Amino acid sequence: MKQLLEFVPIALFFIVYQLNGETLTLGEWSYTVDGIFTATAVLMLATLVQVIIGYALSRELEKRALWMLLAVLVFGGATLLLRNQMFIQWKPTIFNWALALAFGASQFIGDKNLMERTLGSQIRLPKPVWTRLNLLWVSNFAIVGALNLVVAYGFSEATWVSYKLYSAIGFTLLLTVLTAILISPHLKEETS
């Protein structure tokens, strides 16, 4: 449920972007969708609502969700204020690279890496598996961040918007499968 909730702002961003140039009318009020700028405003609002709903459901403010909200508000705000879509296009790269840096640095800080600190109370894994799992996530964040720039600079804005939606789903599924493959042999040992 929580991960499905994370895709809602991206999906709304995509849907609103597709309405570029359309005039939406509600009674006396009408608004013409202004492409990436309207989509960015919707992304900002949807991300804020997502954090509020997440808090209402769990009574916890997740650090990752708060960092995502901060990144969306800062880069989205710059996009709207300066009327330059490159700010919102850089947001996924900077966010993913910051996560890659945090996960990577955690290998050398303390006795547990970030994956073990996050999931260690739920799963028991050997130290080498925690290391591989953490490095898998570092690699994912680094690659996703780099590919975002390739698409942002090498393709049209419309292609980038579509890429954001489909890559978010695709990379999340791939990371989930690879994580399951890494930990599943050890889960069987734990239940035996």
Image (cartoon, helix red, strand yellow):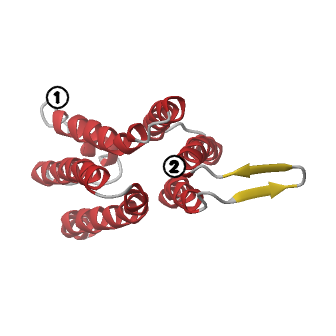
Q: Residue, x 63% and y 46% (percent of image)?
A: 53
Q: Which mark is residue 109?
A: 1
Does residue 71 appear to the left or right of 45 in the view shown?
A: left
Q: Secondary structure at mark 1?
A: loop
Q: Quadrant of residue 114?
A: top left
Asked if residue 107 is positioned above or below residue 151 in the image, the reply reads above
Q: Residues within 10 Å of mark 1 (few under 14, many from 20)?
A: few
Asked if residue 92 is positioned above or below residue 73 in the image, the reply reads below
Q: Which residue is mark 2?
A: 36
Pick the front one: 60 or 163: 163
Residue type at mark 2 is Ile
Pick the front one: 61 or 91: 91
Q: Residue, x 63% and y 48% (percent of image)?
A: 57
Q: Secondary structure at mark 2?
A: helix
Q: Which mark is residue 176?
A: none
Q: Position of residue 148 (x, y in %)?
A: 29, 51
Q: Residue, x 35% and y 45% (percent of image)?
A: 92
Q: Answer yes or no: do the residues labelled 1 and 2 have beta carbons within 8 Å?
A: no
Q: Quadrant of residue 115?
A: top left
3D distance between C-alphas at marks 1 and 2: 40 Å
